[in-house]
Every structure is written in C-alpha cells, then in structure tokens.
Image (cartoon, rainbow, N blue to C red):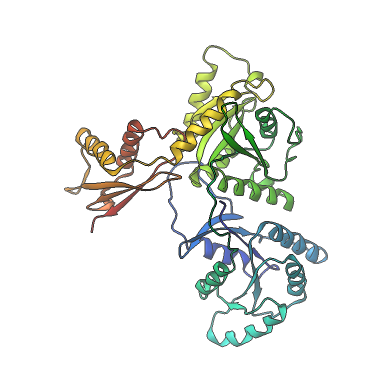
Amino acid sequence: MANPVVAIVGRPNVGKSTVFNRIAGERISIVEDVPGVTRDRIYAHSEWLGQKFSLIDTGGIDTGEEEFLTQITEQAEIAIDEADVIVFVVSVREGVTDADEKVAKILYRSDKPVVVAVNKVDNPELRSEIFDFYALGFGEPVPISSTHGIGIGDLLDQVCRSFPNTGAEIEDHTTRFSLIGRPNVGKSSLVNAILGENRVIVSSVEGTTRDAIDTPFISANGDEFTVIDTAGIRKKGKVYENTEKYAVLRALRAIDRSDVVLVVLNAEEGIREQDKKVAGYAHEAGRGIIILVNKWDTVKKTNHTMQEFEELIRQEFQYLSYAPIIFVSARTKQRLDQLPQLIKRINENHQRRIPSAVLNDVVMDAIARNPTPTDNGKRLRIYYTTQVAIKPPTFVVFVNDPELMHFSYARFLENQIREAFDFTGTPLHLIERKRK
C-alpha cells in the first residue's frame, strides 16, 4: 500500500521550499556513496513519529504579474489531484493576501484535508498575528518558522492526524510490478505485449503516457499479477510543464505501490545518465528490480554483443549488482514469456525471511574466512545478526563499535549472505548497532 501523500502549496515567497526541505530533513535516510542514487527535488519520502509519508513540493514558481494567478492555480490543481493532505503555506508578514484567498477557494472545493501553516513566525510576538488566517476557512492555523525549525513538530502532528484512515490492509496475493524509464523506451509497448492486447496507448511521441495505469492479469501458470504502466521520467531540466511534473510524481508513486520494478532501457540508444537516476528511485525505495533491455531485436549483433552490453550495464549500474538483466523486444515478444516467473521469484526473494540461527552460522563462517578489520589496534567484533524486516530484507548486526564496520566489510557480509540464500533481484539493508 502506498504511503500517504502530503503536498505543499501556496503563493510565491512564503517559504514553501524551505518548509519542504525542513520536513524532508527530519527523516533518517540511508546514504550510499555510489553514483546514480538521487532524489528529485519535487518529491521526497519522510517520516514523523513512525508514520511514513511522501512529500510533494509545488514550489519554485517564477512568474510575471499577469500570469500570477494562472500559475498558482495550476500548482494547486496538481496538489489537489495527487495529495491526501495539503499543507497550505502562508506568510505572517503579509497577512492574508488576494492570492492566498484565490488558492484557498480552490483548495476548499477539493474536499481534501488542508492544514494552514503560517510561516515566518520567527519570534513569539508574531504569534498573535496568526488569527487573521482563520478567515481562510480551514480551522486552526499552525504557526511555524521554517528557517529556524520552530513549530514543525506541531505542523506534522496536525498533518498526521489528517491522514485518511484506510483500516486494516487486506491480504493480497497479487504481485504488483511497474515499468519505469525515460520517455520513449517502449514501456507502453511492453505492457501491451505482456498482456497480449492493446490496453495502453502507444506513441513514438515522448510523454504520451500521463498516468499510472493498473491492469490485473493471470499468467499462463495461473499466477496473479497487476502491471502498473507509468509515464516516462524526464530529466529535471526538461520537466517544463506542470503535467510533466505530475507524470513524474505518478511514476514515483507507482514505484511505492510496486513489489517489483522493471527498469526499462532502450537498446538502440544505449545507457543515458537519466537511466541511472530513474533506476536510483527504485533502488532507494527498496523494491525488487529487474533491468529490462528493450528493442533488442533492432540491434546489430555479434557473438559478444549481449555480453558486452551486460558488462556495460554492470559498470554503469554498480548499485544494482543484484538485479538480473533480460534482453527483450516488445515488437517480437522475445523472452517476454520469461518475465512472469522471474517477477514472481524476485517478489518471493523480496519477502524472504532467514532464521537467526542459520543466518548466524553463515556470518560466523564468513568471519572465519575473512576476519573482521581493525582500526588503531581495535578490532571489530560481531556478536549476533538477526533479520528484522522484509521488503526489502533488512538485517541488524550487533557489534562492539559501529564505527569499525567499514563499508567494504559490510559489502563482504552482504555478498556472503547472498551466496548462502537466494536474494536475486532485491536489495539488502545491513544496519550496524552497538550491543548494549
């Protein structure tokens, strides 16, 4: 189930992006020193008191006076359509402006929960000025200072209380997978080929697909799947239109809703920098991943073409060393019959649990073959390892000092775990903790 979505809207110069950065900065994220793992500025994952959610920044509007109301309307409409809760940022310094009232009318008609954040309340004397914002019609305003971090906790408390109550999640045995990639790599054609019918509009014009489309189907083996087609993710500099920003958001939400993500490359064009960034979204989200090289039928080949292309992928996508690579063609349906079983296998690996006793045997054997490193005469000691989560599989390693766990040794342990158990297609998270 996808996380709730919070959109930040408001007129220019009220501090929307600063609020976005402040909220996004509250979470503790895993940072990897590898190329290609990036996050788009308009979208982030965050967490408050155990509640995870996604965050949209609709800021960055640079307009002339005559286009002012038109553009804030377009930004508000994106947020209305995408968000579960909207944070309406206003400024205490200017009070309620005509532009604020214009946005308020749009949001009021949306029937979405709205939390008014009165920004730039940098000192206690300004708190008495927030009462004017009751006139916007969204209940009690929350005074904040995004620059100093004042009131952000109160704001997030109110936001989390406004999330829709989805109730207990119904057990679903369907494997959900999405196709992501740059525009015009053939994602919609692949969906049609997998389904065996023309369910999705196909066009050679970049950006044809605007929405994520869910289509359930049953494979030849009787396994249930749902395929989510997504709009192509363009380079940040090419995301000119609000509709294109919207398409990026939908694609990233599709990743959140997927068990397995198919990263589609165009064999004709080779690997582009944007391909690595697109794949980084899925890797960072911790999803199972398959690298799909489409249009393979159009490539002139020798006996070594496939091997050379695969080596190039491994070199350019070093952080996806666990992801299998399959060369396909939407036009000829080459190797597409292998996809359902591969997707099912990776989904099973993604939720695989390893008993602690068996896991510790593997780790102790690994240490016996390659002893733990030392630093300034102090040796890393590993006491115990246990799996604490799935999707992706996450392991906690209890040690004497987490600072002694060098990146290279953590990678060694991960590789040993992968050799012992089938984790093909899924990232693994190793967390070092000091034994108390």
Outermost residue, left direction?
377
94 up-or-down from 68: above or below: below
Q: Position of residue 341 (x, y in %)?
A: 53, 28
Q: In this view, does 257 lie to the left or right of 199?
A: left
Judge by depth and name the residue closer to the eye, 387 or 411. Answer: 387
The quadrant in which the C terminus is found is bottom left
Outermost residue, top direction?
303
33 up-or-down from 151: above or below: above
Residue 380 can be seen, yes or no: no
Q: In this view, does 383 lie to the left or right of 386?
A: left
Q: Position of residue 56 (x, y in %)?
A: 62, 58
Q: Residue at x 66, y 34 (%)?
A: 187
Judge by depth and name the residue closer to the eye, 412 or 286. Answer: 286
Q: Where is residue 380 in the image (x, y as percent from the top left)?
A: 22, 47
Q: Which residue is drawn at 51% across and 20% down?
A: 308
Q: Which residue is drawn at 44% across and 36% down?
A: 349
Residue 306 can be seen, yes or no: yes
240 up-or-down from 349: above or below: below
Q: Position of residue 196 (x, y in %)?
A: 69, 27
Please tell me how many numbered marks the rendered image carries: 0
Q: Which residue is drawn at 37% across and 42% down?
A: 353
Q: In which quarter of the image is residue 102?
A: bottom right
Q: In which quarter of the image is residue 110?
A: bottom right
Q: In which quarter of the image is residue 267?
A: top right
